[in-house]
Amino acid sequence: MKYLLILGDGMADEPVAELGGKTPLEYARTPHMDLIARDGCMGMVRTIPEGFEPGSDIANLGILGYDPRACYTGRGPLEAASMGIELDTSDIAYRCNLVTVREGVMVDFSAGHISNGEGRELISSVEDAVPSASFYPGISYRNLVVVHKGAGAVTVPPHDIVGQEIAPFLPSGPDAGTLFSCMEKSREIFAGHPVNRARIASGRPPATQVWPWSGGKTPALMPFARKFGRRGGVISAVDLLNGIARCAGMEVIRVPGATGYLDTDYQAKARYALGALGHLDFLYVHVEAPDEAGHLGDAREKVLAIERVDEMIGTIMDDFAGAIAILPDHPTPVRLKTHTADPVPFAIHGKGRDETTSFSESEGARGRYGMIGATDLLPLLFS
Ligand SMILES: [Zn+2]
């Protein structure tokens, strides 16, 4: 038997007035998701354990069978894995944003969504600035810094403190000294940097410094194949998820045209999924677009993104005979434009049926499986 898990990032929501009091999942035309619900069984899954941030990294670790309470070490090491950076056992990898701080206030956590080329130039300019740290350019404002012989630090995500004074939110703990040096050196070097002079001249915010956060060591994940006795793979345009896959020894399948945004090529994902299922036992297909629509607060766009995910599922189902699970990782309500930690509906097709008739939040709550934890999901699918 082959197994497929389709994850629509942030699909779950609340009733929206603009959609006649329906949720985007209820409102969207989703014949294939509804078929999965009708011929399968539903339930609700709590993907974010008590006390954790409702992030895709936390939720997806759990869904792939790894309890974040036991193994989550931070976002930095997962992105390092995705970028192919090998960490030493004493290395701590931190996410390293390029940010705009003005008069001690965090003005922009992304330095105006700085371009890849500009970001790369700025990060290379601080490369040798702090002996105990190595910088790695990533995508846009999302870079990495690795502290050697590190021991961790308490940090704050820069997107949580936009508009606030940074002083109370500086890193604390064993690595704080090195992280302060990184921030200080970047402030000095970035101040007169040609990239920033050009940005200021054209009215764009300069990247005034780096902001390290969410550091940790490489998480120790038991290889997926050993844990479940099945060869697994992941299709996602999101670094964090590819990082989890690498750490779990799963195959990472890159799909040309998968952007992680609303214009992603859904049909290419379907074709690559079918191709990968030729040699894999389990494939996890992640689609980011509904989450992006949620962050934009755009209910219509979210409905469209969900309908395109459904078409992708249709293309896959035409040529796939195994068991299928479908779910979001967390809600991203358009009203809030951010994630919440509420449980989400899931459906499994190919393991019997219950009374549910369509894929939605309210139907999930009526499903036979009841409320489960994230790490219970794959065992249900594989049972
Ligand atoms: Zn999101």
Image: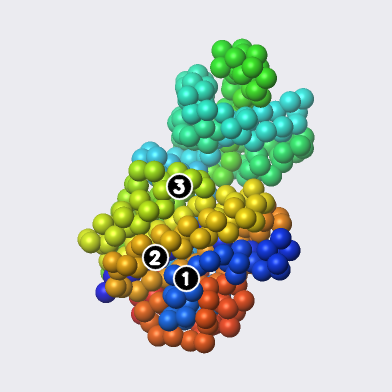
Callout 1 touching callout 2 (CB < 8 Å): yes
Q: Position of residue 231 (x, y in %)?
A: 27, 63
Callout 3 touching callout 2 (CB < 8 Å): no
Tell which of 345 and 55 is nearer to you: 345
Task: Classify the position of the N terminus by image quarter.
Answer: bottom left
Tell which of 353 and 121 is nearer to you: 353
User: Which residue is at 26% across, 57% downward?
Assistant: 275
Q: Which mark is residue 31?
A: 1
Q: Residues within 10 Å of mark 3 (few under 14, many from 20)?
A: some
Task: Classify the position of the C terminus by image quarter.
Answer: bottom left
Q: Nearer the viewer, mark 3 or mark 2?
A: 2
Question: For the residues marked 3 and 2, what is the alpha-carbon distance in whole angstroms?
Answer: 17 Å
Classify mark 3 as within 8 Å of ligand 1 or not, answering yes or no: no
Q: Position of residue 299 (x, y in %)?
A: 64, 56
| Circle 2 residue | 314
Q: Nearer the viewer, mark 3 or mark 1?
A: 1
| Circle 3 residue | 264
Question: For the residues marked 3 and 1, what is the alpha-carbon distance in whole angstroms?
Answer: 21 Å
